Amino acid sequence: MIASLLIANRGEIACRIIRSARKLGVRTVAVYSDADAKALHVRMADEAVHIGPSPARESYLVGERIIAAAKQTGAEAIHPGYGFLSENADFAQVVLDAGLVWVGPKPDSIRAMGLKDAAKTLMAEAGVPVTPGYLGEDQSPERLKAEADAIGYPVLIKAVAGGGGKGMRRVDEAAAFLDALDSCKREASSSFGNDIVLLEKYILSPRHIEVQVFGDSHGNVVHLFERDCSLQRRHQKVIEEAPAPGMDQATRDAVCAAAVRAAEAVNYEGAGTIEFIADASEGLRADRIWFMEMNTRLQVEHPVTEEITGQDLVEWQLWVASGEPLPKRQDELSITGHAIEARLYAEDPAKGFLPSVGRLEHFNLGDDGRIETGVEEGDAISPFYDPMIAKLVARAEDRQSAIGGLEEMLAQVEVWPVRTNAGFLSKVVIHENFKQARLDTGLIARSAEELTDYSIPDAVLLSAISWRLEEFMAAEAKRDAAVSPSGLFGFRLNGTRAPARLGFTLNGEQHFALVQADQVAEGWQWDVAIDGRTEFLNIEALPTTYGPEAETQPQGPILMFSGGHAYQVSFEANRGNVGHGIADGALIAPMPGKVTSVDVSGGEQVTKGQRLLTLEAMKMEHAMVAPFDGVVAELNVEAGAQVQVEAVLARVEASGE
């Protein structure tokens, strides 16, 4: 067994590798850039070496510095994780030439699968089914157009050196082909320095099925069954699961056998993934599943395979790299249960999924399920690297139970002030099509409007009001006043108790509420109208999680977490039954209602607190009073008028203006 291992990566995968290495008694060495000087993987490793400035191209992608760090620390082997240098055949060769162990496939295997066109040709020769398309050397626009016409639209243009969704265009009709080809080639040349493309038949109901394979230096190759990675946004995986829903045993046997043939064709060693595209228009069928590409490394989603097989794939990697045979034979591997993984990103879905950076002042992912992360509370999310901060993995005996487990995990996510996609993920896992396994790679795009609806739920608004009321009562208690609601809402107008007007800002949005308390047999009933919507409120019955500010600063901003979303609430300084005037003297309708009386005329002199008009809402009358001494400069309503929330009813100018 390797005695010491340098991990040429960062974040959650570096931490993941360290944990498995530690179980095997392997000493670990971390590398880090300026931005990662205090990162979790640095703190976890037995030793750490600084390798350069924050940008990856000046640190994690500089192979010479990785090799030097290994030599400096006496590390015997290098594990590349995923991303960065993990599929760089030239770097793998440099590692071997330096007398070090490369924890990954041989450089020749990486090269063989590195270009999509060559890989597909190789797979077809090995008897692996490939998607109908064109892989020829003739790259003239005329030849490519003719081949696309022959394949039939829609077709997919793909850069042979592409990845991450770049260098890819769907073309639905012949007239659009040449423009799409030109655009694809420009992007491919800019991103990869290679503008060669291939053509594929575009699958209208595509599912992304991949098979985990593993080989050793003794000629053994096994598969560890399949995963479904169909839930994608802009060609990036969002949620992965194993096994694939709807996969019968005959189809599984055929697809997994094809994956093993693919690995054997390149004399594969170590962990790899054979990716297939399936036409799921008639369910999963062996004759409608085709090879796409091979990832010659450990995958981000490998934990779901570990959860259903009971195997540690990083341990397998270290055994194989040490020259040992695979730990299990094919007949010793089986599927138990179902596992689903969600990728938690530091990004703001409300702002087009822009990455969110900064310090994790509050960071709690709960205690359920399996959590793979590379950060802790107090760490910083850097703008220099991938924004994934954790993977949440739920396992259960069946798929529906696993979905429920993941839903619970996402509900427990509390992150602030960095934004995350937890709320978006929560909406995905409870989406009916996902629950019913009606999957394809376009599901998220088709459901984008409902999955990215970030309107604030009424439960959260009511929770904010409950905190405001408790704040009022606490303030009354300090003044030795009556703590009961009657003490707060005792002001009467024409024999009717006047409601309190409460204002607060929730995630930058201003909200207004009218609150009235009435004594009932069980105690006090609160009638609340938030932004014009009437609700019944029982303070004790609101199930919302609160952040630390709520415990330490009840008078200031508080945090609330619900459904994976984070909410910050700030309260207005004014309290109770005072009028609705603001700095410029405007009287704003706090909710829709009817003007029952107008007591002044335009141009009339008024004094502070004088009633100007009365608004009836929630079956209660509410006095609108002058905020200060002045003159009625604007009167926009008359008795009997129906008004909407935040309408300017009148405006008072201070005397002397």
Image: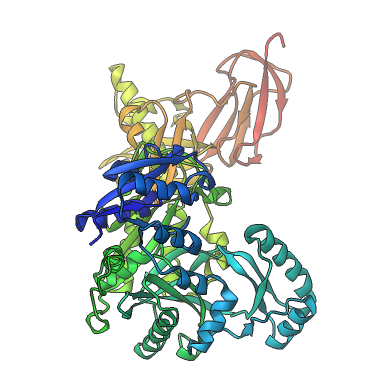
Name which residue lies at 42% across and 69% down. Answer: 106
Image coordinates for residue 34, horizontal then vertical, percent: 45, 37
Could one spot residue 45 in this view of the protein?
A: yes
Q: Quadrant of the C terminus?
A: top right
- Who is closer to the viewer here, 448 or 587? 448
Image coordinates for residue 579, horizontal then vertical, percent: 54, 24
- Who is closer to the viewer here, 289 or 487? 289
Q: Quadrant of the N terminus?
A: bottom left
Looking at the image, is 643 positioned above or below residue 653? below
Residue 130: quadrant of the picture: bottom right
- Who is closer to the viewer here, 542 or 56? 56
- Who is closer to the viewer here, 397 or 495? 397
Residue 462: quadrant of the picture: top left
Looking at the image, is 490 positioned above or below residue 345? above
Name which residue lies at 50% across and 61% down. Answer: 90
Name which residue lies at 48% across and 45% down. Answer: 59
Could one spot residue 278 in this view of the protein?
A: no
Image coordinates for residue 260, horizontal then vertical, percent: 39, 82
Image coordinates for residue 277, horizontal then vertical, percent: 51, 79
